[in-house]
Amino acid sequence: MFKKVLIANRGEIALRVIRACKELGIRTVAIHSEADAASLHVRAADEKVCVGPPEAALSYRNIPNVLSAAEITGVDAIHPGYGFLSENAHFAEVCESIGIKFIGPTSENIAMMGDKAKAREIVAKRGLPVTPGSPGELRSEEDALQAAQKIGFPVIIKATAGGGGRGMRVVNKAGDLGRAFQAAQAEAKSTFGNEGVYLERYFLEPRHIEVQILADHRGHVIHLGERDCSIQRRHQKLVEETPSPAVDEKLRREIGRVAVEAVKAAQYRNVGTVEFLLDKDRNFFFMEVNTRIQVEHPITEMVTGIDLIKEQIRLAAGHPLSIRQQDVVLNGHSMECRINAEDPEKFIPSPGQITKYSAPGGFGIRVDSAMESGAIVVPHYDSMIAKLISHGRDRQESMARMRRALDEFVIEGIKTTIPLHRRILDDPDFQKGHVSTTFLDRFLAS
Amino acid sequence: MFKKVLIANRGEIALRVIRACKELGIRTVAIHSEADAASLHVRAADEKVCVGPPEAALSYRNIPNVLSAAEITGVDAIHPGYGFLSENAHFAEVCESIGIKFIGPTSENIAMMGDKAKAREIVAKRGLPVTPGSPGELRSEEDALQAAQKIGFPVIIKATAGGGGRGMRVVNKAGDLGRAFQAAQAEAKSTFGNEGVYLERYFLEPRHIEVQILADHRGHVIHLGERDCSIQRRHQKLVEETPSPAVDEKLRREIGRVAVEAVKAAQYRNVGTVEFLLDKDRNFFFMEVNTRIQVEHPITEMVTGIDLIKEQIRLAAGHPLSIRQQDVVLNGHSMECRINAEDPEKFIPSPGQITKYSAPGGFGIRVDSAMESGAIVVPHYDSMIAKLISHGRDRQESMARMRRALDEFVIEGIKTTIPLHRRILDDPDFQKGHVSTTFLDRFLAS
Amino acid sequence: MSTRRSARSKKKTRPLILPNAFGGPEPETLLTGGQTKQIQDLIDLLRRNNLTELELERQGVRIRVRLEVGVKPVTASVQESVPSTPQQTSHPATTTGPSAEETTAMVTIASPIVGTFYRSPSPDADPYVEEGDFVKKGQVLCIVEAMKLMNEIESEVDGRIVKILAESTKSVEYGQALFLIDPKATP
Amino acid sequence: MSTRRSARSKKKTRPLILPNAFGGPEPETLLTGGQTKQIQDLIDLLRRNNLTELELERQGVRIRVRLEVGVKPVTASVQESVPSTPQQTSHPATTTGPSAEETTAMVTIASPIVGTFYRSPSPDADPYVEEGDFVKKGQVLCIVEAMKLMNEIESEVDGRIVKILAESTKSVEYGQALFLIDPKATP
């Protein structure tokens, strides 16, 4: 097992990883920008290194400084968290080359899955269901038109290097395709430095269902059930839950099997998430593999009892899987609300000092956050400041706990999305589990 | 189901009950003394009533004021928490007589089990194992001597109305019996207003094992496994865990069956706890029944997923048990550390203002507390200010989580027992689960 | 003695009216609003009374004003730590306390028990007292009903009823101010 | 150009020494406008009342204003105990910063990268600079090794090296102060 791990991240996920390391008896090194010198994740670690100015590109994404920090502190491994360098194949490769273990999949896994069109190809070749779409990257407008006419409108154009809604365009008819193609390419290039785009059938009211997988170095793969992440605003997840109200035991087995096969096809290692679209007729289609720990991983932990960060670390250290598929038991229901430092109506970021912070507690409530009274939410990074996670014997109890915990949560000095979450939980359709990825837009419009 | 419940308690247990009520959609009324006007449990409730000055006897134990508060707010039921009026048969009886449901066992149950000697008699009559001792209350010194000589020294004299170590005396030889008998009687009278005492064999290094039971109004009874509460200082529990390292599946079934039979013998209703001594040869003996929710109930909740406060409320409202014995599954291991506002070495209470309060969070950690930054720990009540509860897949993980959570817990301005808990968790005997009720005294002496 | 039915009194038979057996505590005014103004008030108070030192501490707020003997200047210190200010939730019959000026040298009669406040011995009887009335120490001012018992609340001083702070038939909590009496007033 | 072996350099071959390509940021101390205003208000209050001392503590900020008897000037001190003060954990090569007086009008040369600090180009060579030396803008002061690359750190000003704040062969983090230079000094 590793003796010392550097956490190449900040905020709640850095603290989450530090906690797991402490429980495993591993020493920790925090890195931080000048803006985060007083942050909780820094104080929670055994050692700390300032790696740059507030701008993420010059600090948390600064590969030379991050690796120098790893070298001068003598760590065995680096945990990248999510975001920043977590899906940077080059970074994973450099780590491997200098003998520092990258806690995550191989650099080849990251590179392969990072090319969304390529990933679809590999999965489709195995005979697994992928969203109908262009076979690979689109070379031209004509190429796009041909593909779109074959699968039928509406279609969605996506960046091959994409994620988070950037470089995406929905096209309803052939006449709009040319302009959308060019716009998506331009946005893809400016955002990801890669203008490659592909297209897929666009589903009208799909659910976003993802499956958590674990894979060891011997190629054994298991899945830990699904997460329903349909509550999204501009492709940013806001509320996640497991099990999905739309997935029964039979569908769970089927979609789990496909997820396991998909990552086996890619010789995938460590933890990952396979994302699917689930249409109204309960057909599901592979979308992509996320080669990192996900923000919403805690809900899977709550129902399985399995600590995913510890599993990541154990798998990276070369341990075989300690759990067999038949040992995975899903207990009850869990839900997560992402609390963002944003105006809950206009979604304008609301950085500033938290004058009072008091997190809810008690049975069935978990809070993952690096915030505290007096902490300053800086404007340089993601606006997510806390994850509120509930667990109950069933969806009803889990929702009731979430409601009372949202009522208890006190964050003063900045605006947060807590009131929005409270409203979502009061919505009758949400309460019945009748949601899709279009739910939130309609909810906000009404 | 009840529409509105008054919580006749304060601090963490009042907040615990308020949370359960909110999750059930029940309105809540907090009561408070003048010393607690600004407390979190008061702000968490829908309504609040000041019931007296700081002295508990004139406020929280003031039956006329508590019942008047229930009347003027129009509640259907009263939850007594633990301590204060929770085991007061007269209070339960008055509640029943004025048509307000007492959330707990019947007043007869409380009265019967409150007489410890009587409870032993009832259980012994059913042929269940009780600690060898006097058949009932001791009438005289000669009576005591006769009983002691029959069962053999050492013996322990206990108050029939007792609890919490008051009115107890260990006697090693016949010559010491007379003085100890008189001292125990006097202490029993001054503490409980009842000088009745009885005696039992005194075990040298027993474990304190207790079984959580649930009983509905139809007489169906189930148990939720045991709790090991052997880490005690002067009969005050400090650390509890479940499952007990000393109890295997076979013993659990056996001790559970006895616990269920014992409360069936008393026609017991609602929730309760049956306390046993477990000797080194794994013989167990009935000690008493606690007719209230226990401080340490959360660890049972963590491994069973069953919300005991909600069950109390449902059972009091006349709902039948929704869980059968075979549906009770124990998942993993849970531990609780009671954080007291006390000097961790001298155990002198440390009231005062909490200048900074920051509770630990993350996976497998639960905190039940009504404290916050700026809160004032008043000297009038119990010194317990927080319960830190861990849960893990096994005892190892649960302990590792507890350790890192104790390290994270920040309470400034007053002294707490956190450093003591940290030391206990580092003790090799504790880590191996080799403990008894004498553990802490030896630990503190070394 | 008299009988009276409260809102929830269906099961009630003959409630008793008990004489006052409680001593009411006096509510104190809290520091709220501009601190500068309050410190100034304390300094003025200190000067007017030729004090050398004045210290006030309540609910996490400590104010200390000191005048060095033989020296003109005064020392003042305020210490406040109030993250836990009580949040007002909907409690039965919330009464905002009288302001600082009103209570100067006034005596407050507070409820010694939790119950229901009645201004008259029975629904058709006249109120015990009205605002402006002069009362004697020991005179009954009202009844607070609790547990089917009617408790007479008596005045602790001679004086004039300046204000009646609770509403008849409404519930009152322990320590809630019921009457404000000016003990200096004479008929 | 020169080669040098660091503590973890078994795999290293021929490291490069790079010229300074970074600009060091200057640390600032801040007092918010609101705080200044509040202190002024307290001083005014003190003066108006000829106080000797006034202390105010609220939510972690304590302000004390004192007027010495028979002395004109006013002393003001602000103590802020932000709940999130960085706890000093064992980080590589912790350097306590120079005190306020020392840094007045001084220029701090900070490390623009994370790495290992070396005062000389090779183990057997003389240090680039010593305390008391006069340096020119652009003159190499030290090397910080990172990722097998030797980065030369140059002076940003003309002046005298007042203090060398880091220890050779020890690691330095981003922004860590390495040298204190007095730009007003002349040889």
Image: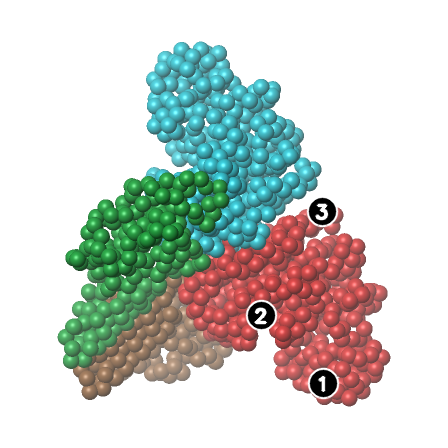
Chain colours: A cyan, B red, C brown, D green
Q: CA distance from mark 3 to mark 2?
A: 34 Å
* Residue indicated by mark 2: B84
Secondary structure, mark 1, is helix
- Is mark 3 in CB contact (under 8 Å) with mark 2? no
Residue closer to the observer: A242 or A47: A47
Residue located 44% across and 24% down the image: A160
- Image mark 3: chain: B
Secondary structure, mark 2, is loop
- B52 sits to left or right of D51: right
Residue at mark 1 shares a chain with residue at mark 3: yes
> N-terminal of the two: label 1 or label 2?
2
* Residue indicated by mark 3: B327
Q: Quadrant of the C terminus of chain B?
A: bottom right
Type of amino acid under label 3: Asp
- Closer to viewer: mark 1 or mark 2: 1
- Is mark 1 in CB contact (under 8 Å) with mark 3? no
Query: Can see residue A179?
Result: yes
Q: CA distance from mark 1 to mark 3?
A: 48 Å
Secondary structure, mark 3, is helix
Disc number for residue A215: none
- Image mark 2: chain: B
Query: Can see residue A15?
Result: no
Residue closer to the observer: D136 or B16: D136
Type of amino acid under label 2: Phe
For label 2, count other residues whose C-alpha is less than 10 Å away and answer few (under 14), some (14-19) or many (20+).
some
For label 3, count other residues whose C-alpha is less than 10 Å away and answer few (under 14), some (14-19) or many (20+).
few
Q: Look at the picture and state if A311 lies above or below C37.
A: above
Q: Measured from the top left, where is residue D93 in percent x and y?
A: 40, 56
Residue C30 quadrant: bottom left
* Residue indicated by mark 1: B180
Q: Measured from the top left, where is residue D156 in percent x and y?
A: 23, 48
Type of amino acid under label 1: Ala
